[in-house]
Amino acid sequence: MAHLKIKKLLLGVIMTNCYLVYHDQSRQTLIIDPGDRADQIMNTVKEMSLTPCAILLTHGHFDHLLAAEEIKNAYGIPVYAHEEEAEVAADPGLNASGGFGIGSRSLQVDVKVKDGQVLSLAGFEIRVLHTPGHTKGGVCYYFADEKTLFSGDTLFAQSVGRTDLPTGSYSQLIRSIKEKLFVLPEDVQVFPGHDGETSIGYEKKHNPYIV
């Protein structure tokens, strides 16, 4: 993975994976899916001597963004999400924040990205893969040079994301995985929004949901 380093934090009521994805020389970091506990995230950033430059959301469900606004304001950095997901992040009825006793939450997205767009951030080239199904604007972030994929709640280790929440579609999800993810090299390492890491090759052979 060359200069790419990853620090994973488990945050919030659903134990969401928040990733600090950083360059080991410049110490610039991307914060992917800051699901909760802005204080813990910022303390880790400080302890590791990192410099945040952007927040990347794989999708707009509350458990992936609760700490985003506080972190955005603390560092003066933008929030990135797919153009179709901005509505989900901003609408408590779509981001599912009303059902877990945390109150309605809303987040405004600063930079709306498109499928296939390549982002140059923190010294990395990151391709946006639009993978609707879990939500309508869900994306995966693919670091091709580092053979690393952050899959959000699209693809898990031997599982897939749920599709029973607003804007979800099971048929879309399976199509997204087959057409956008399973065409990647088999040695691409996958870092999901929940639970442990896996690889594209392993999931092609062992994921029971993809036939």
Image (spheres, rainbow, N blue to C red):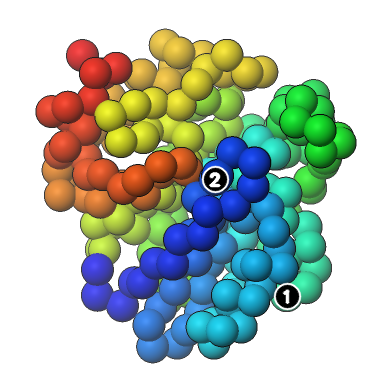
Q: Position of residue 160 (x, y in %)?
A: 39, 26
Residue 72 as seen in the image, left or right of residue 159: right
10 Å neighbourhood of mark 1: few (<14), some, or many (≥20)?
few
- Residue 206: image tag: none
Marks 2 and 1, how far apart in space? 22 Å
Give the amino acid type for the residue marked by disc 1 in the picture. Tyr
- Say whether residue 51 is visible: no
Q: Position of residue 191 (x, y in %)?
A: 36, 49
User: For this rendering, which residue is in front, 206 or 11?
Assistant: 11
- For marks 2 and 1 on the same chain, the one whose residue lies earlier in the sequence: 2
Q: Residue furthest right?
A: 103
10 Å neighbourhood of mark 2: few (<14), some, or many (≥20)?
many
Give the amino acid type for the residue marked by disc 2 in the picture. Thr
Q: Position of residue 105 (x, y in %)?
A: 83, 40
SS at circle 2:
strand
Nearest to viewer (mark 2 / mark 1) = 2
Label 1 sits on residue: 75
Residue 40, quarter of picture: bottom right
User: For this rendering, which residue is in front, 117 or 138?
Assistant: 138
- Say whether residue 5 is visible: yes
Q: Residue at x 70, y 39 (%)?
A: 62
User: For this rendering, which residue is in front, 44 or 5?
Assistant: 44
- Residue 16: image tag: 2
Residue 172 as seen in the image, left or right of residue 44: left
Residue 72 as seen in the image, left or right of residue 2: right
Q: Are marks 2 and 1 in contact (CB under 8 Å)?
A: no
Quarter of the image with the N terminus in it: bottom left
Q: Position of residue 135 (x, y in %)?
A: 57, 26
Q: Residue at x 22, y 50 (%)?
A: 188
